[in-house]
Amino acid sequence: MINRPDVLESILAAIQNMRILVAGDVMLDNYIWGDATRISPEAPVPVVRVSHETFSAGGAANVALNIAALGGHATLFGWIGDDANGRKLEEILSAKGVEIVDGTVSPRHETITKTRVLCNRQQLCRLDRELNPEDYALTDGDVAEFLSPAMRGVDAVILSDYAKGCITTESIRAIQAAAPAGMFIAMDPKPRSHIEYRGMSVMTPNKAEALKLAGIDCDDSANFPADEVFSRIREKFEPKHLVVTLGADGMLISTNGGKTPGEHIPTVAREVFDVTGAGDTVIAALTLAAAAGVSLCDAARFANTAAGVVVGKMGTAAASPDDLRRYISEARKQ
Ligand SMILES: Nc1ncnc2c1ncn2[C@@H]1O[C@H](COP(=O)(O)OP(=O)(O)OP(=O)(O)O)[C@@H](O)[C@H]1O
Ligand SMILES: [Mg+2]
């Protein structure tokens, strides 16, 4: 992590107002909270009495919120339906200053929504609303019409793939072709066999995703064959930098084509409340810092620090500059 306040301040100052375009699978997370004291007479299921309902932005939309929370300027592209859930999502995003690219809200698409029913604080079931992946695929025409103009005014691009269909080999190629020369393009992949994530500035898979990208069939909990994973991903996809996140073990990184991990960045052991969305924080913070000219190693340390903040928070999936300041000052006391 970053443990010197002066280093943190210089990165925070550098990333303010950096402009990042986030494109990918946009989702709405919906939580229905309640309790159950009886079984339904209609079927052997509990009857949940709803107390309240909450909404948050998921997938690429959560990446955009993480950019905004850190002080960057986020522009988001990813299909949002012309429906009630879409309006909810727009409300959440605009409240945090995230700009939505024209054309994002589309009557042809349903807003991808995951509704979790929580009964006595435990998840009872999840209800997913989404179309087929083919329905969300970005065509060359979409890239030309919506993403090309949006890419002109930004300092970097993040592609946030949640396997809902937006990111395909073709859309990746079209985005790369349309991007201004030298544009930093970061990819958080959700590997499927038919997708080629070639030529990214940086990729940030987690352990399981890295194994899949490398084509190594091995149990995630077994000893992680880091050298083999790195060299295979390098050979197949040739990213400039590779950051593999290891959950509680931090991250492994290799920069500028290195075939093996050059550095391990450990996490600082703290109380962990909620690890979901940590990957979104990583790619947001990493890309902001890299776009601002911070070295990839320092950008990764910064991202690791921001993710450490987020996993220590319940319910909130983004870190602010003040959260980071507090976090490192507390870590220094330990
Ligand atoms: N238990 C933990 N303790 C401390 N830090 C953690 C923990 N879990 C995750 N992190 C931080 O978050 C980063 C990303 O975590 P992880 O590898 O789980 O990503 P992920 O699987 O993509 O997450 P998600 O998809 O849920 O957002 C790690 O590199 C680390 O910095
Ligand atoms: Mg992830």
Image: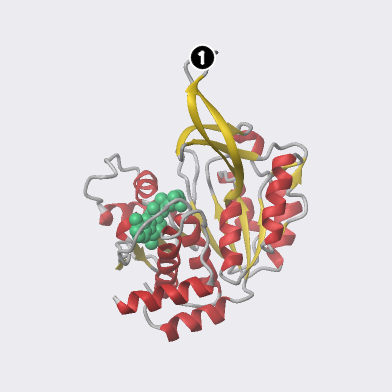
Label count reads 1
The residue indicated by pointer 1 is: 43
Q: Residue at x 50, y 79 (%)?
A: 11
Q: Residue at x 64, y 75 (%)?
A: 17
Q: Nearer the viewer, residue 208 or 97?
A: 97
The location of residue 330, given as percent across then percent down, is 37, 75
Classify 207 as above or below 302.
Answer: above
Classify 315 as above or below 307.
Answer: above
Viewport quadrant of the N terminus = bottom left
The location of residue 57, given as percent across then percent down, is 60, 50
Q: Residue furthest front?
A: 37
Task: Say what amino acid the circle numbered 1 marks.
Answer: Ala
Viewport quadrant of the C terminus = bottom left
Q: Viewed as shown, does residue 108 lie left or right of 96?
A: right
The location of residue 207, given as percent across then percent down, is 35, 50
Label 1: element kind: loop
Q: Nearer the viewer, residue 172 or 116?
A: 116
Q: Viewed as shown, does residue 189 lie left or right of 18?
A: left
Q: Which quarter of the frame holds ligand 1?
A: bottom left
